[in-house]
Image (cartoon, rainbow, N blue to C red):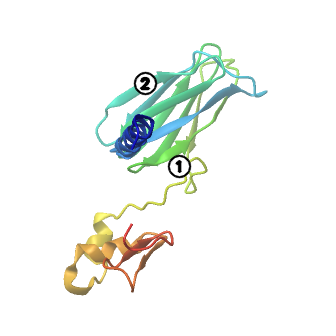
Amino acid sequence: MNSSSKTWVVAAAAFLLASAMLAQTVGGTVFGRVADESGRPVAGASIAARNVATGVTRAASSDAEGLFRMVELPVGRYEITVTAAGFATEVRSGVQLQIGQQSTLDFGLKVATVAETVTVQADAPIIEGTKTAIGSNITTRQIDELPLPERSFENLIFLTPGITQGVTEATSISAAGSSGSS
């Protein structure tokens, strides 16, 4: 191998390693846009995500285009509150986050005439339009209640969409149509 080829191999390996490290996540992400009733962005809006079970709050603010992002929020149920000067406060409760989940929450703030709060009870969308990875969360209830042959935890992987049992490979698990050796 010449030095140019070695450089490309090292660069490709570094890229793959970095991609794998970025894929490791232990929380969820909430992002979206804050706008007024006419759809214009609200810059500088305060967004607070409070974990209902623990009471821990994480804060962010919207940028000039009204966009905000909160990453690595611990798994749990959240209440998201958006406030901005001159606008009514909007509260969204019942937002459930799972590991690796990316939820888009857009807010349309109403102009405040008197102090008022708008509360919307909603769950995070089931379909994630921003994520292409196949994944699944297995709950404790599923582990306790599902009839698993031999009570083997390895059988839980087959509950994930796109996972099948291979018949020709050394390993018996195949994901998204790939061979079991992957």
Earlier-in-chain disc, 2 versus 1:
2
Q: Position of residue 133 (x, y in %)?
A: 49, 55
Q: Amino acid at mark 2?
A: Ala
Q: Indicate left or right for 166 with 155 as reference.
A: right
Number of marks present in the image shown: 2
Instruction: Mark 2: give few (<14), some (14-19) or many (20+) Cα within 10 Å.
Output: some
The residue depicted at 20 percent of the width and 85 percent of the height is 150
Q: Mark 2 to mark 1: distance in Å?
A: 18 Å
- Closer to the camera, 48 or 150? 150
Query: Which of the pair 179/140 is nearer the observer?
Result: 179
**Secondary element at image label 2:** strand
Q: Residue furthest front?
A: 2
Whether label 2 touches label 1, CB < 8 Å: no
Q: Amino acid at mark 1?
A: Ala
Quarter of the rendering containing residue 32: top right
Q: Residue furthest right?
A: 38
Which residue occupies 49% across, 38% down?
30
Where's the N terminus, which quadrant? top left
Q: Position of residue 41 (x, y in %)?
A: 69, 22
- In percent of width and height, residue 97 lies at 42, 47
Q: Quadrant of the C terminus?
A: bottom left
Of the pair 157 and 58, the residue shown nearer to us: 157
Give residue 110's quadrant in the image: top right
What residue did someone put label 2 on?
59
Query: Would you place residue 169 above or below residue 32 in this image?
Result: below
Local secondary structure at mark 1: loop
- Residue 10, image x, y percentages: 37, 39
Mark number, residue 124? 1
- How many residues crowd mark 1 within 10 Å: few (<14), some (14–19), many (20+)? many
In which quarter of the view is residue 105 placed?
top right
Residue at image x 46%, y 32%? 70
